[in-house]
Image (tube, helix red, strand yellow):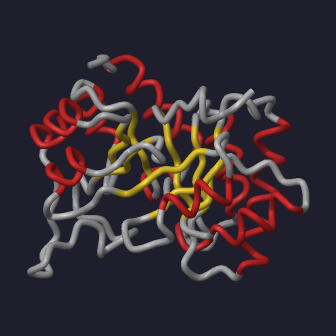
Amino acid sequence: MSMRKNLDISAYFVVGPENTNGRPVLPIIEAVVEAGYTCIQIRSKTASARELIELTRQAADIIAKAGRSEKTALVVNDRLDVILAARKTGIKVDGIHVGQSDIPVEVCREYLGEDSIVGLSAETNELFDYIKTTDVSQIDYFGAGPLHETQTKPDCGVGPDGKVITRSFDDIRRLADISPIPIVVGGGVKPADIPELAGTGIDGFFVVSAISEAEDPKAEAVKMAESWKANYKKR
């Protein structure tokens, strides 16, 4: 079964070694998978290619052991080389997430194939025009934000003047109305944001530090996922 055809971005967790306050990454991934998250993104600007391949392998094993290989998508941020190398060794990686200055989505699609997931960050000062006008034929979802300024990715949403452009709930409702493909929104998202975010018409939330730095990551993951389900309204 193609994860691309059954893509669910409703509960989306992003993590790398730099996001866990020095704690091991794997138990946190395990907690999130057990909490039923539908997408895990491995992202690191500090880990080597070999470290990322190994982390991806271990994440794929966690998903498989939980019996969620057909329910939880595993993607890697930016590193097409890591995904290709991981797949060469038999690791199940479902796709890639790239930013607008990363490898073009057409190249990702060419190398990864039609069954792979390709997500694109749509963080730009001309966000609405971008989402309305960009060619989405090779893209499966947009990642948008930030909802709040975030230390996890301080440059997220920086405009031409160097200031961070955060997104209001009204902005997000408008994005949901105009986007031709699913949208997942994050950036500083906290549990208190989920009820209103789930009512905007977008397709999911993504989260990093609210779970990865939590005292009890699984409890926090469960709280946020259950809150999303309880408040979600389809557009």
In the depicted structure, whether residue 96 falls above or below residue 222: below
Quarter of the picture holding the N terminus:
top right
Look at 67% across and 29% down and name the residue there.
Answer: 71
The residue lying toward the viewer, choosing from 36 and 113, is 113
In the depicted structure, whether residue 25 falls above or below residue 69: below
As drawn, the residue found furthest toward the right would be: 89
Quarter of the picture holding the C terminus:
top left
Look at 20% across and 39% down and name the residue there.
Answer: 175
The image quadrant that residue 81 belongs to is bottom right
With 162 as the anchor, is 6 left or right in this view? right
Q: Pinpoint residue 165: horizontal percent, then vertical percent.
A: 14, 64
Q: Pinpoint residue 96: horizontal percent, then vertical percent.
A: 58, 56
Q: Pinpoint residue 76: horizontal percent, then vertical percent.
A: 62, 59
Q: Pinpoint residue 99: horizontal percent, then vertical percent.
A: 41, 65
Look at 59% across and 54% down and name the residue there.
Answer: 109
In the depicted structure, whether residue 211 falls above or below residue 198: below
Look at 75% across and 64% down and name the residue there.
Answer: 84
In the depicted structure, whether residue 155 falls above or below residue 69: below
The residue lying toward the viewer, choosing from 75 and 191, is 75
